Image (cartoon, grey):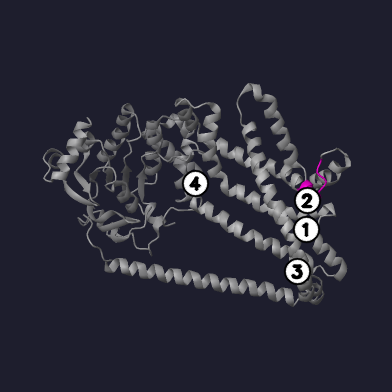
């Protein structure tokens, strides 16, 4: 039925016009980027204190000496981040499911989950870290972990689970009640409805904000250095800074943190685009 | 008016991936005429309406409104859309706004009309669709038929020169279909130009000035309703109508 098609003169003219517009947009964005970046760099390097700032924060020699130690420390941050990510997703999911449960028998559990989320969403991360890193060993209980890396992971998980639980709860509540009704009408139990119908849709819907929490956790994994005995990237930077009297090692650590977060950020964008969160309405 | 059709669709082509939905489709709609589009699901009725309303970019061909090529990328698409009204199968009312705010949104934000003027006009329009008393309600408090009438009021309040209807009764209960089709008949008596995709053959018979049967991305057959629906020339039109009769809808 389909006839062979060659673009008409009208369509070729439109395509040429659109290509022209695209070329123009690319040129404009390139030019504006160069102007903006140039202005920022110019203002920075011509400022009166630039020489001192450069020596304190951007000393290439100090950066090069600090790099091996900071990079070694970063590996610990990455491991803490990965472990805490996995734990926070599991624990957050548990909290979200408990909080959205409907059964009257589960009222105390629901109240407990709500209280936990309120408490940990409101408490600054650094305070939770101090309490866990120094408070737990201080109890001198048998069987509690002594490693500050493990304790730090626990503290990060405790706080981030509260955030993740709220994101997942929003996802669960965004699933239209007709989906539940359809599932229950087929004879699925409440739990089965949750497991096979509601959660799969809810999780898909909130993947972008969840990944946002994962990126945020990656950055906060640097906070475990407050424990003092942990040799992570930030702690190594601190040591190097005390030896060289330059803050450059911190900048090195910061750059490394950004570098490992970029792939994940791009991945988040990709997922969001695939789920159609961006504008896809044809011509605006 | 020079006798030039209000709307001209010329050799329109639309492709999704490897599927050719519209394959060089031609169609004219004269001012004050009601043209009904019929055809199987997937024959391109909705796509055609969306292309005409510039909600989709066309891949070739053109849509001319009052003789002007509106599919040209140099044309301000928003200004063109503001002169056409479209009503969708699934209503697409804004759930976070009241009925009145749904109707006044475009007059206020697009046409820059003051709130009190826009509200007076909107209330008059709601009066016409028989829903003035529900102005303060939210869409989810209305029945399907009422929601669709609000959607029609929302489109009409902008004084469009052309109204597009995309299977506006397909999501309604049978007893609610009448109230919406009644609105369309009333619009015809007022001289509104309309392009209507529908499966309601009874409506097509009564109201249409011409009926177009879409098949394979083109208008396979068109003419007055009694001819296309009563004595079709094309074999494919016959088969389509037989299936409709078997489904008890003619």
Q: Position of residue B204 (x, y in %)?
A: 22, 38
Q: Chain of mark 1?
A: A
Q: Earlier in the sequence, mark 3 or mark 2?
A: 3
- Magenta part of the protein: which range? A144-152
Q: Position of residue A142 (x, y in %)?
A: 85, 38
Q: Secondary structure at mark 1?
A: loop
* Picture disc at residue A67: 3
In space, the residues marked 3 and 4 are separated at their CA atoms by: 63 Å
Q: Secondary structure at mark 3?
A: helix
Residue at x-position 69% and y-position 49%: A83
Q: Earlier in the sequence, mark 2 or mark 1?
A: 2
Q: Chain of mark 3?
A: A
**CB of mark 2 within 8 Å of CB of mark 1?**
yes
Q: Chain of mark 2?
A: A
Q: Is residue A32 left or right of residue A122?
A: left
Instruction: Check disc 4 and report the residue beneath it.
Output: B114
In space, the residues marked 3 and 1 are separated at their CA atoms by: 13 Å
* Dot 3 alpha-carbon crowd within 10 angstroms: few under 14, some 14 to 19, many 20 or more: some
Question: Are labels 2 and 4 on one chain?
Answer: no
* Dot 4 alpha-carbon crowd within 10 angstroms: few under 14, some 14 to 19, many 20 or more: few
Q: Nearer the viewer, mark 4 or mark 1?
A: 1
Can residue A165 be seen here? The reply is no
Question: Are labels 4 and 1 on one chain?
Answer: no
Q: Position of residue B250 (x, y in %)?
A: 20, 32
Residue at x-position 77% and y-position 43%: A123
């Amino acid at each position: 039925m389909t006839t062979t098609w060659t673009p008409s003169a009208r369509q070729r003219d439109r395509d040429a016009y659109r290509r022209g517009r695209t070329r123009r947009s690319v040129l404009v964005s390139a030019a504006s980027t160069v102007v903006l970046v140039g202005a920022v760099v110019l203002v920075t390097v011509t400022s009166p204190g630039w020489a001192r700032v450069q020596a304190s924060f951007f000393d290439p020699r100090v950066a090069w000496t600090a790099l091996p130690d900071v990079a070694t420390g970063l590996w610990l941050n990455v491991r803490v981040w990965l472990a805490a990510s996995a734990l926070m997703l599991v624990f957050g999911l548990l909290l979200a499911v408990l909080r959205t449960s409907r059964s009257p028998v589960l009222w105390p559990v629901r109240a407990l989950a709500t209280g936990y989320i309120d408490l940990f969403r409101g408490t600054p991360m650094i305070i939770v870290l101090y309490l866990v890193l120094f408070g737990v060993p201080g109890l001198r209980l048998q069987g509690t972990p002594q490693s500050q890396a493990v304790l730090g992971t626990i503290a990060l998980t405790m706080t981030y689970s509260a955030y993740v639980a709220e994101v997942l709860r929003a996802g669960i509540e965004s699933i239209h009640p007709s989906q539940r009704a359809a599932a229950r009408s087929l004879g699925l139990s409440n739990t089965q409805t949750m497991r096979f119908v509601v959660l799969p849709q809810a999780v898909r819907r909130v993947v972008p904000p969840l990944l946002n929490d994962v990126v945020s956790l990656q950055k906060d994994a640097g906070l475990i250095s407050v424990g003092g005995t942990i040799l992570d990237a930030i702690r190594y930077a601190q040591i190097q800074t005390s030896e060289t009297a330059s803050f450059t090692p911190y900048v090195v650590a910061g750059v490394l943190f950004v570098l490992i977060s970029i792939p994940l950020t791009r991945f988040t964008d990709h997922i969001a685009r695939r789920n159609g969160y961006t504008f896809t309405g044809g011509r605006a | 008016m020079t006798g030039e059709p209000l709307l001209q669709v010329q050799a329109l082509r639309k492709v999704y991936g490897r599927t050719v939905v519209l394959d060089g489709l031609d169609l004219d709609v004269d001012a004050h005429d009601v043209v009904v589009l019929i055809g199987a699901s997937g024959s391109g009725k909705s796509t055609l309406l969306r292309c005409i309303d510039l909600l989709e970019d066309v891949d070739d061909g053109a849509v001319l409104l009052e003789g002007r090529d509106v599919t040209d990328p140099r044309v301000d698409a928003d200004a063109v859309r503001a002169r056409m009204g479209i009503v969708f199968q699934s209503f697409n009312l804004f759930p976070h706004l009241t009925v009145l705010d749904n109707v006044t949104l475009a007059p206020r934000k697009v046409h820059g009309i003051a709130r009190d003027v826009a509200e007076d006009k909107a209330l008059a329009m709601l009066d016409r669709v028989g829903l003035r008393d529900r102005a303060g309600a939210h869409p989810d408090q209305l029945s399907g038929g009422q929601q669709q009438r609000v959607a029609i009021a929302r489109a009409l309040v902008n004084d469009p020169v052309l109204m597009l209807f995309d299977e506006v009764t397909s999501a309604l209960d049978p007893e609610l279909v009448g109230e919406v089709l009644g609105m369309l008949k009333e619009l015809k008596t007022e001289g509104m130009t309309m392009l209507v995709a529908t499966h309601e053959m009874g409506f097509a018979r009564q109201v249409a000035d011409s009926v177009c049967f879409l098949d394979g991305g083109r208008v396979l057959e068109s003419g007055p309703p009694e001819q296309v629906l009563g004595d079709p020339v094309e074999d494919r039109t016959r088969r389509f109508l037989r299936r409709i009769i078997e489904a008890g809808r003619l």
